[in-house]
Image (cartoon, rainbow, N blue to C red):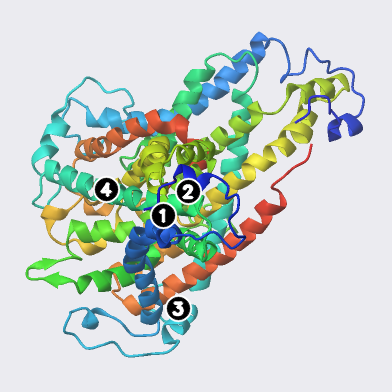
Amino acid sequence: MTTLTRESIRPPMTAPRAAPRKSFWRLANPYLYLIPAVLVMGVMTYYPMAYGVWMSFTDYGLKNLRVDSPAPNFVGLQNYIDILTGAIAIPNFDFFYTLFFNLFWTFSNVIFHVVIGVLIAVLLNAKGLWFKGIYRAIFVLPIVIPTLVVANVWRNMFDPDFGAINQALAMLGGLIGISPAAFHIRWIESVNPPIPGVPLPLAYFALLITNIWLGWPFMTIVATGALQSISKDFYEAASIDGASPTQQFFRITVPLLRPAMVPAIVYGITLTFNLFNLIYFVSGGGPLRETEILVTTAFRLVNEQRLYGVAAAFAVFIALILLVITLITNQVSRATESYDV
Amino acid sequence: MSSTNVNVPVAATAPAKPKFTYAESQIVGQKMTLPKQLLFQLILLFITFTVIFPILWVVSMSVDPRADVMRPTTLNLIPPGFSLKAYLDILERPTSNPVSLPTLFFNSLLMAGGSALASVFVGVFAAYSFSRFKYRGRAVLMLAVLAVLILPTVALLAPLFVLLNRVVIGDFSLRNSLLGVGLALLSTLLPFAIWNLKGYIDTIPRELEEAAMIDGCSPNQTFFRIMLPLATPAIAITGFLGFLSGWTEFYISWQFLTNPQNFTLAMALYNMTGQFASSTPWSHFSAMSVIIALPVSIVYLALQKYMTGGLTIGGVKG
């Protein structure tokens, strides 16, 4: 390794203007730092990725698992076609329904997270409010508790017989004289859509409630940080000019929150799109696979169907869809990056 | 933001409504009026109630002294007493699988801790290289790391499963081991660690390193003596986030592991919920939930104030 000496940092007085001779180690050093990561990611990330793409063109299945088993057959684009046409052994498998539901699930959730998160942040930011610190401390709890545990707990809370949700509703209903039997709601299993004309099962709303509980505090934290950096002068000037609090909210607060909220929204979209734990543990994708998303389907293809080739093709679809989403959200967030005041 | 520039849209377009004066405006108002204060408190109390409702429910059930609450028939948010019997009951054998709680705990700890340590240990070198050197191929390599970040781990499940399944040495199958699960987890944890740490190192001013160089430190000495100590908080947080994703990892372990002695806490929790758990008392399920959530939640809470900045992007790798 080269060490800097007094001689080497002193500017050369009479040296020729040739490029300074760099030692081999000096040139190789940045690459040396990369070697461990390249080795690990090469073996554990990129090789499996490439292998997965190859697998997606084969009928890789249980019969090919053993070390000494024959190589799988090359089937061309058959797996991709089977996925798109729904020709897969899973009952009610419909790729486009799942994709559409996945997108609808993502955007409906993020909208609730942002609206509720920002409103609560504004509420908490009100001057002179009591117990601010206590509220802020409590409101981070949904962020710090692992989603895995949250999802399993809510699964039991939605139980029709013993779940806390139905019991709480029955208690509230009892106050106004409704019989507790009316609250034997089958949150997860019920097949009939609760809102006529809207083809969404009750399980979707159960998932939505759970994910709203999980998601708004993050948006509140981001919004609070941004709110505190908005200069009070804007509000002073606005009220001198006679703007109502509502006008101030929509014309000052919202536009000035936007630069901070956009990255948080992008993050929320990616997170919600791939929210395996919640869907898998709360609804299990049911009823009738109506609340299945792409990542839970991918897991079922491997874990239950053992169609490894099909699962690999499915993963290629997921990667492509996420690439498109990332490119779009990147464009949007770049367009809103700097907001000149 | 210039304080003299008040030319925001509202100033130009707001209709003159004199009934709102500076002093009355809720946001800049000097003191909140009492009715408004009470209204706000009422709303916030309701929100607080919804936030702590599931937590109270599960904690209350886990310490219920009427031990072995098979299924709660009434809603209890405040436990009617206190007993740790449910925790003691699940110590020996929480699920129908022949594995004890300490073993499950140790397995989760080993797998999560191992992959988190490996990810930051390997990641910090790569992050330093990306952040501090300019060289041929740097942009391409960084893009390659970034591309993996958008991919959920479950997309790699099939190839990882069949590839690790082929690594068999004697009786040892890499696929059917905690080491295999940890390595599979590392496939997406490492790029996450590299990116997180690079983002942090980018914010450390170069002057300190330059000063060290002038004082005669080699680039490697600079890395070990200046950069590593400065990056310790980021390494701790990145390591913790990696630990968290290993601690609550479900689908790789569920797919890979068949020997109950290797099972993890997350797998046991799934075995104790929903349709698989007709014989599991809910007090046991609740105690298990608390055991999984409590340690990581406390650490998260302690680190939380350091995390709201740039480190949140990609915060949970699923």
Residue designated by label 4:
B112
Q: Quick one: label 1 or label 2, which is nearer the N terminus?
A: 1
Quick one: label 2, few (<14), some, or many (20+) residues within 10 Å? many
Q: Residues within 10 Å of mark 1 (few under 14, many from 20)?
A: many
Q: Are marks 2 and 4 in contact (CB under 8 Å)?
A: no
> Which SS class for mark 2?
helix
Rounded to the nearest angstrom, the CA distance separating label 2 from label 4 is 22 Å
Say which mark, if any, is on residue A83. Answer: 3
Distance between mark 3 and mark 1 Cα atoms: 38 Å
Out of A319 and A339, give the one closest to the viewer: A339
Disc 1 chain ID: B
Mark found first going from the N terminus, 1 or 4: 4
Residue receiving disc 2? B198
Please determine if labels 3 and 2 lie on a single subunit: no
Label of residue A161 in the image: none
- As helix, strand or loop, the secondary structure at mark 4 comes to helix
Q: Are marks 1 and 2 in contact (CB under 8 Å)?
A: yes
Give the mark toward the camera: 3 or 1: 1
Q: Nearer the viewer, mark 2 or mark 4?
A: 2
10 Å neighbourhood of mark 3: few (<14), some, or many (≥20)? some
Mark 4 residue type? Ala
Nearer to the camera, A176 or B105 = B105
Quadrant position of residue A232: top right
Query: Please, what secondary structure does the residue beneath circle 3 have?
Result: helix
Q: Position of residue B118 (x, y in %)?
A: 29, 51
Q: Nearer the viewer, mark 3 or mark 4?
A: 4
**Alpha carbon distance from label 1 to label 2:** 8 Å
Identified by mark 3, the residue type is Ile
Q: Nearer the viewer, residue A28 or B294?
A: A28
Amino acid beneath label 1: Ala
The residue where tag 1 is placed is B126
Q: Nearer the viewer, mark 1 or mark 4?
A: 1
